[in-house]
Image: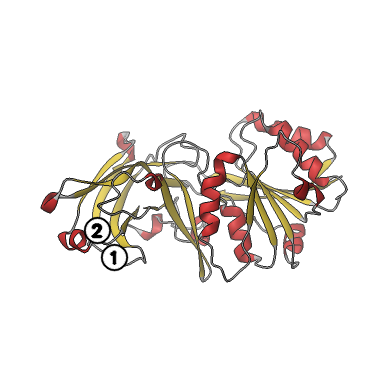
Amino acid sequence: MHYIRFLKPPRVVGGGSSSNLNAKITITTDLGESFLFSQVLLVTRLESENGENLDAGHEYLWKGQDGMRSIEVKIPLPQALLRSKRRFKLLIRPKHESYAVDDFAAALYSGEGNEGRVVAVRSMSIDDASRASAQQALVERVFGSGTSKSRIWEEKGESIARHIWYEHLGQLPSLRERLSHSNLRILELGAGCGIVGITLSTAIPSSQILLTDLPEASEILTHNLALLPQTRRKPTYQVLDWTEPLPPNVQSTIWDVVVVADCTYNPDVVPDLVATLGNIAAGNSNVLVLLAMKVRHESEKVFFELMNTSDWVVEEKAAVLLPVLGGEDEEIDIYVFKRG
């Protein structure tokens, strides 16, 4: 799967009748290690803050097969919009629905007609007075699940931290049985933008869910959590550094499930991750560890070696194929570990 990303946040340039909205975008994989090597027709749309269309849209052709790595987007701003002083957002998405990811089901569908998907992106709200707003460093992605939608903000640009990496929990009997209970205590390590924990809170609203990450993720996580409806129990967030002792509240809680989504790509931090899992499981042999990962290099095997020597065993495993436009399908591996 590929993601549209803003390399430069949208900004209003010019003035009067010649005002434009300018932005620079790219289309890359989750880690940004490769650009989309296919042609895809993109469409831009200006939206009000409540989703109303404000212009007729403009089209741009991504020429990946010609080595394209970015596109400059320049959109004439309607005079009526400028005069109204309304705040608005810029949406960029594939024009054809067969390439778009509007819900989790579309991302997972691997049947006929799905050669891969491209995830749309929305900017922060823009107005003429916020040409250089620091908040424009954040962008929004929207995913549907049944009748509900998850709105997740991530950072713009090419860094791999605090971006959405798509994973799927899969159909695993032990995990499904555990998640069928009410009032679960779920801990996520390395939460990033928080999409996994936030999605779990939507599916299991009665659960106590704690998202953790390093201090650098605090701003994006607290931003996403603040946007959740007040009508249901929200996940909470706190800093948890794997190189430090567990915070007292984490150490004293009997966790039902610990979630680790795509945290094994850096082998240098894996020993600390495995040690943290061991500390969480101390006195709690019933805890399940859910790991979702996309294997990127051989060095990630060290995680399984250390888990084995630390008395963890694989209870269940599943694989989900993820079609990639212009490339080979990727495989997402899902593991459920329990104490041996």
Residue 220, image x and y in percent?
A: 51, 48
Residue 137, image x and y in percent?
A: 40, 44
**309, 22: nearer the viewer:** 22
Residue appearing at x 56%, y 68% in the figure: 230
**Which quarter of the rendering shows the C terminus?**
top right
Q: Is residue 322 visible?
A: no
Label 1: few (<14), some (14–19) or many (≥20) C-alpha neighbours in 10 Å? some
Q: Nearer the viewer, mark 2 or mark 1?
A: 1
Task: Classify residue 98 by image quadrant.
Answer: bottom left
Kindly identify which residue carries mark 1: 53
Kindly identify which residue carries mark 2: 57
Residue type (three-letter) at the residue carrying disc 1: Asn
Judged left or right of residue 49, residue 55 is left
**47, 319: nearer the viewer:** 47
Compared with 331, 256 (above or below) is below
Say whether marks 2 and 1 touch (CB < 8 Å).
Answer: yes
